[in-house]
Image (tube, helix red, strand yellow):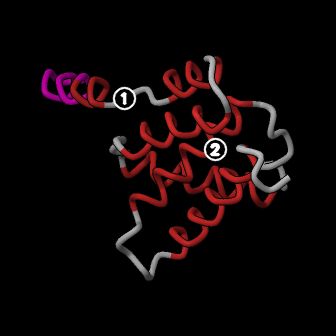
């Protein structure tokens, strides 16, 4: 690896933000499901994903839906909040693109997850 490649790799590592740790801390913290959702939602709204993350997040939520697992354990705060985070990031990234089917899917996935997690749809 050349010096320039090493510097580029280091810069990319430094700009990649670990979103999982704060979501896990929120999930394990005190507060109601609504309060935890609000904190994760705020985190997601401020998050700037890489193109790779955006693709991965989209694939993750689609797979969770296809597998029928995304609402299977609504008491698992970390699981639910990570899915909510991913869906909100995808939805926010494509919100101006009416032609992007992933946006519509992410929005519906987010709404279903949010309301179920918060106990609105019981």
How many angstroms separate mark 1 from mark 2 (CA)? 17 Å
Q: Residues within 10 Å of mark 2 (few under 14, many from 20)?
A: many
Indicate whether residue 7 is drawn in magenta: yes
Q: Quadrant of residue 14?
A: top left
98 up-or-down from 116: above or below: below
Q: Which residue is mark 1?
A: 17
Indicate whether residue 44 is drawn in magenta: no
Closer to us: 52 or 78 = 78
Magenta stretch in the rendered image:
1-10
Residue at image coords 42%, 80%: 98
Q: How many marks?
A: 2
Regarding mark 2 in the picture, which secondary structure is present there?
helix
Closer to us: 99 or 81 = 81
Give the quadrant of the N terminus. Answer: top left
Q: Residues within 10 Å of mark 1 (few under 14, many from 20)?
A: few
Closer to us: 105 or 38 = 38
121 up-or-down from 25: above or below: below
Relative side of 36 to 99, left or right: right
Residue at image coords 59%, 32%: 36
Place of residue 4 in the rendered image (x, y in percent of width and height, measured from the top left): 13, 27
Q: Which residue is mark 2?
A: 83
Relative side of 38 to 47, left or right: right
Place of residue 107 in the rendered image (x, y in percent of width and height, measured from the top left): 57, 64
Residue at image coords 49%, 54%: 55
Q: Earlier in the sequence, mark 1 or mark 2?
A: 1
Regarding mark 1 in the picture, which secondary structure is present there?
loop
Q: Quadrant of residue 81?
A: top right
């Amino acid at each position: 690896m050349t010096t320039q490649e090493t510097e580029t790799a280091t810069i990319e590592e430094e700009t990649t933000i670990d979103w999982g740790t704060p979501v896990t801390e929120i999930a394990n913290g005190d507060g109601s499901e609504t309060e935890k959702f609000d904190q994760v939602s705020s985190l997601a709204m401020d998050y700037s994903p890489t193109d790779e993350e955006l693709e991965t997040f989209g694939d993750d939520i689609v797979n969770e839906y296809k597998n029928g697992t995304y609402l299977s354990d609504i008491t698992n705060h970390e699981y639910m909040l990570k899915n909510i985070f991913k869906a909100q990031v995808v939805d926010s990234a494509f919100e101006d693109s009416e032609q992007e089917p992933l946006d519509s899917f992410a929005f519906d996935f987010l709404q279903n997850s949010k309301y179920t997690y918060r106990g609105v749809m019981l």
